[in-house]
Amino acid sequence: MISATHFIAQAAREGFDFYTGVPCSFLTPLINGVINDDGLRYVGAASEGEAVAIASGAWLAGRRTVVMCQNSGLGNTVNPLTSLNAPFRIPTLLITTWRGEPGLGDEPQHEVMGRISHDLLSLLGIEHAPFPTEGEAVQGVLAAATRSMAERSLPFALVMKKGSVEKVELRQAPVRPRPAGRRADWSDDGSRPRRIDVLEALLELLDDETAVIATTGKCGRELFTLADRPQHLYQVGSMGSASAMGLGLALNTPRTVVVLDGDGAALMKMGNMATVGANGPGNLVHVILDNGVHDSTGGQATVPVDFAAVALACGYRSAFSCCSVKGFRIAFGEATAGEKPALIHVRILPGSLPKLGRPTVTPADVARRFKAFVSGHSAPAER
Ligand SMILES: Cc1ncc(C[n+]2csc(CCOP(=O)(O)OP(=O)(O)O)c2C)c(N)n1
């Protein structure tokens, strides 16, 4: 058995300073140790996939990240690990437990995942090693993980057996609901804009210092077609992860972060909004471009939701509704000048440009260009 403080201190020596995840009883002492540590930030996520995206956003801001989860949550990480971390080459230290280890006599719901966890990690192309169970082994294991992450620029996993870490009592401040945020409705009789009209208006309104993360599908493709700049990140995959990545970034940079989401994507990972609201980054503007359909895949209907109401219920400090370019301009001005996190729900028309480009810069290059922009350096800084 090792102590959580020893692991955390050794990890800090390797530069790991940002933790996120979803608990597991095997992980309890380590998570408690991280939460108890005033020098560390732990972001509790609603799902393990969200945690992976939050960590990716934090990495873009120059942090070294750790994602902690139960192996039954590995399934929830598969989408961002394969379509975000892999193409964008974003590393993270993934600490996953080994519930259902054969011979352990664990609960039936862990049996299958217990049998396949290591194979699943290998299939995902993620190098992995056992989580250390002796104090003397910690430094070497972390050094090997760091080396692999630096060489491959991909996640590395440590698989934790039951009883690896000594018990730690949790000291945690209660999470209190936030006071009600402000709502403004700038819906008018103007004709509904197309997504490209809103993006054009946004590009006029944006300053050169703001970081923009665009959701998967035609949103990012339209943004790229209008303008390709280091301050843009086109999240070509990981549907639903834009706001989580935006959160991880916003918590670690003074820059304003604008997340461009789709209604389908926002619905897919609506738990993200609860995490955004609770963590309350004062520099995040979350824009949901709501065309009522999955436009990028042929226009299949989504379900109607009052996203401004959801945002306020989740603790966003302000939320705006609009359905015209004029309304969007007012809402964006108020959102950037006012209390954040802010959400702008823009109702738009389905449809896209007939000739739409796709980002020609590789995701890995987009990520490094964006990371350099966020850090304020022109040359990419690899960590
Ligand atoms: C996990 C996952 N499921 C499905 C898809 C396929 N897909 C790509 S874009 C998209 C629609 C996104 O809808 P929305 O967020 O509303 O944006 P819109 O296309 O309307 O701009 C879908 C379903 C995907 N990329 N990833």
Image: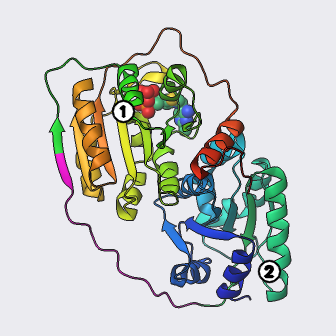
Magenta extent: 168-183
Which of pointers 2 and 1 indicates the residue nearer the eye? 1
Q: Where is residue 298 in the image (x, y as percent from the top left)?
A: 46, 18
Residue at position x 48%, y 60% from top? Answer: 251
Q: Is mark 2 on a helix, strand or loop?
A: helix
Disc 1 secondary structure class: helix
The disc at residue 138 is: 2
Please name the amino acid that badge 2 sits on. Answer: Val
Query: Could you tell whether 52 is left or right of 331 in the image?
Result: right
Quadrant of the image for the C terminus?
bottom right
Quadrant of the image containing the N terminus = bottom right
Check disc 1 and give the amino acid type: Leu
Nearest the eye: 356 or 83? 356
Q: Quadrant of residue 267?
A: top left
Specify whether residue 283 is in view. Answer: yes
Label placed on residue 205: 1
Name the residue: 74% across, 80% down. Answer: 10
